[in-house]
Amino acid sequence: MVDGVRRARAAAGRAVARVSGQALGPYQSAVVRIGFSATWLFFLLREFPNRHELYGPDGPWSFALAERLIASNHAFTVLVWSDAALWFEVVYALSVVSSALLLLGWRTRATSVVFMVGVLSLQNRSVFMGDGGDNVIHLMAMYLVLTRCAQVWSLDARRARLRGSASAGAAGPALWVVLGAVLAYGAVTARFSHGWLAALATLWVVCAVWWRADRYEPEGEGRAVLDVVANLVHNAGMLVIAAEVCLIYATAGWYKIQGSRWQDGTALYYPLGLDYFTPWPGLSSVVAGSGTVVMLLSYGTVVVQVAFPFTVFNRRIKNVLLAVMMLEHAGIAVLLGLPFFSLAMITADAVFLPTAFLLWLGAKVSRPPGPPARAGTPPVALPESGPAGRETPGRGPVGSAV
């Protein structure tokens, strides 16, 4: 029994050291960052001609109605600060720019905050304009602020390799000074609720402390403590994202089970007859014309959604269901004409992708064009650590972007 207790303590110690010693899932968090920022960016660009009707002053949900709703539900949006068309254009433009910068991984900690503010501001301005995919982006925009999602596949990671620190340069401090001025203005004019003011002010102060420690005491104890806290917050954020995905599929699957159309296997038939969900009428007619195909797709959707949360700890079954769900969302994008919903869900699913697959995919994407390597040519060895002696992502802590 004593040996069992010792083994349990040793296992617990190793688990704590692993969770606090490194930010887990660096490639998965990078995919989540790239996927959601790209989804929101493409949506904003596609709807640019319709932006005033969707979220702006020409929409059916007027500024007065938005003010009344925000006063009752206390949702966050900076678009109720003013009803001027110029202010709306500024917020929309900043949302586009922050999405592009987050996609590239430039000064990710600051741009993730601006990205979150843009998503929440636009969506909470007109709450009836969204769908399930918008709800997922809404949640993930807040979770991304907690993660160290720029450890790989980002300009911040490139800066850390070349200059020894992701916070190097004057752009980061200048950006946070601007954000601090906006925060101070909102606090003085009582634009923020107490909860959001406390959250944003805490984030600003923590990032300022981080920048100072990273710049002047990169090997000090304070910097090490900040690394541990950042790793814990990142790992908690990734756990919440994974749990959120499981919750989405579990609730969707069990709600479907209660529906009579899903029970008799005809649920998919009805949206295929609606003009709104038939971008390819010929293809929709072919699918809807086969009762067997409709039944298999309807039952298969329910089975996969209900089963997935119970398979996350079985690698092989989880990977199979993951591939099936991604193919299902790709089919929804094509068959039902919901590309942004599908892209958001595929991105959310990516948090469960195996690291080996992501490394293979990254190597395929980043491989420069040219003739294939000749047989017998030795591969180029990759460095195990960065220029400042810090370990590479997935092997140990790295500097967070400021």
Image (cartoon, rainbow, N blue to C red):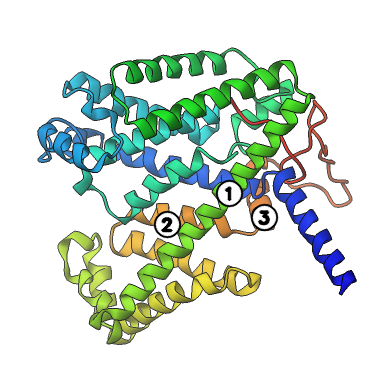
Residue 45, image x, y percentages:
32, 36
* Residue at numbered disc 1: 236
Q: Which mark is residue 345?
A: 2
Crowd band around label 1 with a 10 angstrom C-alpha radius: few (<14), some (14–19), many (20+)? some
Q: Which mark is residue 355?
A: 3
Is 40 situated above or below 94? below
**Residue closer to the observer: 61 or 161:** 61
Helix, strand, or loop for circle 3? helix
Viewed as shown, does residue 183 lie left or right of 379?
left
Residue 170, image x, y percentages:
59, 12
Residue 215, picture quadrant: top right
Residue 128, image x, y percentages:
19, 48
Disc 3 to disc 1, how far (Cα)? 19 Å
**Number of numbered tags placed on the structure image:** 3
Please give the name of the residue rendered at 35% of the width and 20% of the height, measured from the top-left corner. Answer: 187
Disc 2 to disc 1, how far (Cα)? 21 Å
**Residue 369 shows in this picture:** no
- The amino acid type of the residue labelled 3 equals Thr
Crowd band around label 2 with a 10 angstrom C-alpha radius: few (<14), some (14–19), many (20+)? many
Helix, strand, or loop for circle 1? helix
Residue 125, picture quadrant: top left
